[in-house]
Amino acid sequence: MLTRLETEEGEPAIAAFLDKAALAPGGHVLGLTGPPGVGKSTLTNCLIQSFRANGEQVSVLAIDPSSRFTGGALLGDRTRLQTDPLDQKVFVRSMAARDRLGGLSDHAIAAIALLRAVSDRVIVESVGIGQSESDLAQAADTVVLCIQPGSGDSLQFMKAGVMELPDIVAVTKADMGRIARQAASDVEGALSLSRRRNADWKVPVCEVSARDRENLEPFLGQVEAHRRFLGAGNRLPVHRANQHRHWLLDMVRARYGLAGLAYLAEKERPATEPPGSLYPFQAYADLKRELDARLFGV
């Protein structure tokens, strides 16, 4: 099905299948973002092992930046993950970001909807080079921003909107000692100056060394705490509905730009649920057929 998502994009049967998957309660989607070399793949390995130790089915979607010539993935994140090839409850897929500058392509969004429907845990590992953080915030349930001590990242984050996006900040390579503690302090200061996505959730800063498994359990505890936070009341259904709405707008914007968004606005009903908030893939398939016929005569 992941292959068909790319080869049969926009087909009514595929769109209907994806919307059914998107509406399923599904598992928890954990997004990891941060600059190359920060240790996301090593942390992902630890997460896979911990989740599998609890008997959970795990899927990993590794997003790579793309070649401008072929569109293929450049880094091969999948090859850095150490998984048991005989374990049928771990699934790993790498996917190119295509033209999203490190963000999530439409195919990646569709893959997340599919994987969360069939997994207890979905780990999405993206390359943090700008757009990926905001894209990931609209695709994951819990966003973890990874920061490397001594890299100067924390100082940049003080003046960047990226600090509004994470639900958890992980200062990796905590075995570096004083430098890691300083980075954590800098990030806490940056967080105090930023506006949060959810005022009811205080973003924790965790120092963790995936290589040595140092402070891994406290980090996992924060992941679980945020999962429980989303599960309280009506937060998760509202969160997912907002995601679906964003997916539709982003798919239309990426392909058709302002003309597509204007056309979408014309079709919106005066109701509490705008079209596509619950069925983003079918709504996009319908719009795609109509706009392609109008704009391109196909």
Image (cartoon, grey):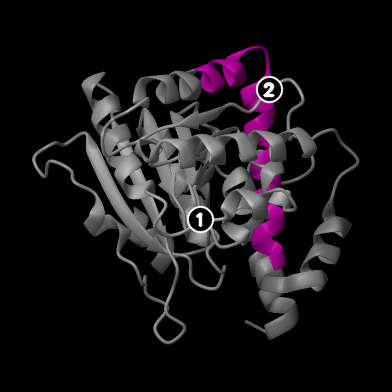
Outermost residue, left direction?
Answer: 86
Residue found 24% across the figure and 31% down from its top = 49
Residue in front for this viewpoint, 237 or 177: 177
In the image: residue 262, left or right of residue 229: right
Amino acid bearing label 2: Trp
Residue 151, numbered circle: 1
For disc 2, the neighbor class at 10 Å (few under 14, some 14 to 19, many from 20) is few
Taking the magenta stretch, the answer to whether it contains residue 248 is yes
- Could you say where residue 210 lies in the image, as x and y percent from the top left? 31, 37
Residue 193 in sight from this viewpoint: yes
Residue 30 in sight from this viewpoint: no
Q: Quadrant of residue 261?
A: bottom right
Outermost residue, top direction?
Answer: 233
Residue 201, numbered circle: 2
**Count of numbered marks:** 2
- Could you say where residue 4 lies in the image, as x and y percent from the top left? 37, 60
In the image: residue 98, left or right of residue 288: left
For disc 1, the neighbor class at 10 Å (few under 14, some 14 to 19, many from 20) is few
State the predominant SS element of the stretch in magenta. helix
Residue found 73% across the figure and 35% down from its top = 197
In the image: residue 270, left or right of residue 30: right
Quarter of the rendering occupied by the C terminus = bottom right
